[in-house]
Image (cartoon, helix red, strand yellow):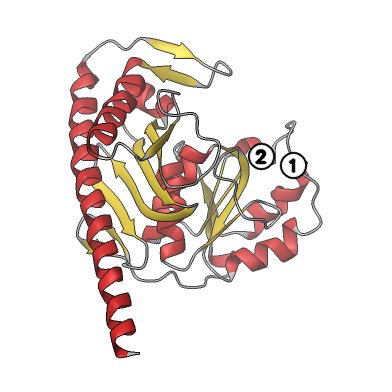
């Protein structure tokens, strides 16, 4: 029994060493990519639209994703990559180790404001989040977590998330969802907005999830989000005891778009019970 226990402990130590090695590389690359993005601020950007006129992409988005793919493939050739701009692999399942990369989350902010955007990387093994990294390039704030070892902003450790009542909560919610729209009856969320202490919208899902981890926000709600938008933030928030589901309270699908409801514990249940339990999406 003693030998078996010692072997398990040794295996866990080796595995942690492997993940710390991956984490070290990922942090180095994300900061290098951030420096290149900052250099682009003085350049004229080539802006294209994707699915609609507000879904924007620049050559910097594409170059940044290609940078990560090159580095990952050089150092971890067996790992798969799911990237927003489509330069990674065709990922049909979450077997093995999968990097889910958003080179610039908040491209509209990047273009118009040169702030309020982030690089987001979630690294998963067999569908389980292992490493989450969200880098606020302009403010040099790197939010990061290795599963089971806490979450941080640079060297500052975050405390576990504490429960908060809706009347005292700040909720991240785009105004689109409380005005007439095609995805949800605005009457469902309007009372929620009135009950909460306040609402905010930053235009970068990755940053908004990082802000929940940091305690700057208490919940985040949106009707549609892609895996690269939430993959890293999911790991950060869950590491601190937060709850991550769809608006129906179901687990997120890391290979498709989802409705998103991410919140501090307690508050998640309160909002589900009072506002979302019987809603139709």
Is 14 left or right of 169, judged from the image as shown?
left
Which secondary structure, mark 1? helix
Q: Residue placed at 59% from the left, 50% from the top? A: 252
Q: Is residue 83 left or right of residue 247?
A: left
Q: Position of residue 136 (x, y in %)?
A: 29, 41
Q: Residue at x 41, y 26 (%)?
A: 107
| SS label for mark 2 | helix
Could you tell me residue 276's position as x and y percent?
A: 73, 56
* Whether residue 111 is visible: yes
At horizontal 34% and vertical 37% (from top left) the residue drawn is 118
Quadrant of residue 61 in the image? top left
N-term mark: 1 or 2: 2
Q: Can residue 223 be seen? A: no
Q: Quadrant of the C terminus?
A: top right
Relative to 5, is 225 above or below? Answer: above
Q: Which residue is mark 2?
A: 177
Instruction: Using the image, tell me which numbered label, if any, was put on residue 186.
Output: 1
Is 220 drawn above or below residue 218 in the view shown?
A: above
Q: Nearer the viewer, residue 179 or 144?
A: 144
Marks 1 & 2, CB-CB < 8 Å contact:
yes
């Amino acid at each position: 029994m003693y030998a078996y226990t010692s072997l398990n402990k040794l295996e866990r130590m080796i595995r942690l060493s492997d993940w710390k090695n991956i984490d070290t590389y990922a942090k180095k690359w994300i900061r290098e990519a951030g420096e290149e993005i900052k250099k682009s601020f003085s350049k004229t950007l080539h802006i294209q639209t994707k699915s609609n006129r507000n879904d924007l992409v620049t050559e910097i988005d594409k170059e940044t994703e290609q940078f990560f793919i090159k580095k990952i493939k050089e150092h971890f050739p067996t790992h798969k990559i799911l990237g927003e701009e489509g330069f990674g692999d065709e990922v049909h399942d979450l077997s093995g180790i999968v990097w889910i990369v958003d080179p610039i989350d908040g491209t509209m902010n990047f273009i118009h404001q040169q702030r309020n955007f982030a690089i987001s990387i979630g690294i998963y093994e067999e569908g389980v989040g292992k490493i989450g990294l969200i880098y606020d390039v302009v403010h040099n704030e790197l939010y990061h977590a290795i599963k089971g070892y806490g979450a941080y902003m640079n060297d500052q450790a975050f405390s576990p998330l504490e429960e908060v009542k809706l009347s005292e909560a700040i909720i991240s919610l785009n105004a689109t969802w409380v005005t007439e729209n095609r995805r949800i009856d605005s009457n469902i969320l309007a009372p929620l907005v009135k009950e909460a202490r306040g609402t905010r919208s930053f235009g970068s899902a990755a940053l908004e999830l990082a802000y929940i981890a940091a305690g700057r926000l208490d919940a985040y709600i949106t009707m549609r989000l892609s895996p690269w938008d939430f993959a890293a933030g999911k790991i950060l928030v869950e590491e601190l005891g937060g709850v991550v589901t769809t608006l129906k309270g179901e687990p997120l699908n890391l290979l498709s778009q989802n409705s998103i409801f991410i919140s501090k514990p307690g508050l998640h249940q309160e909002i589900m019970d009072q506002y979302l339990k019987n809603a139709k999406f």
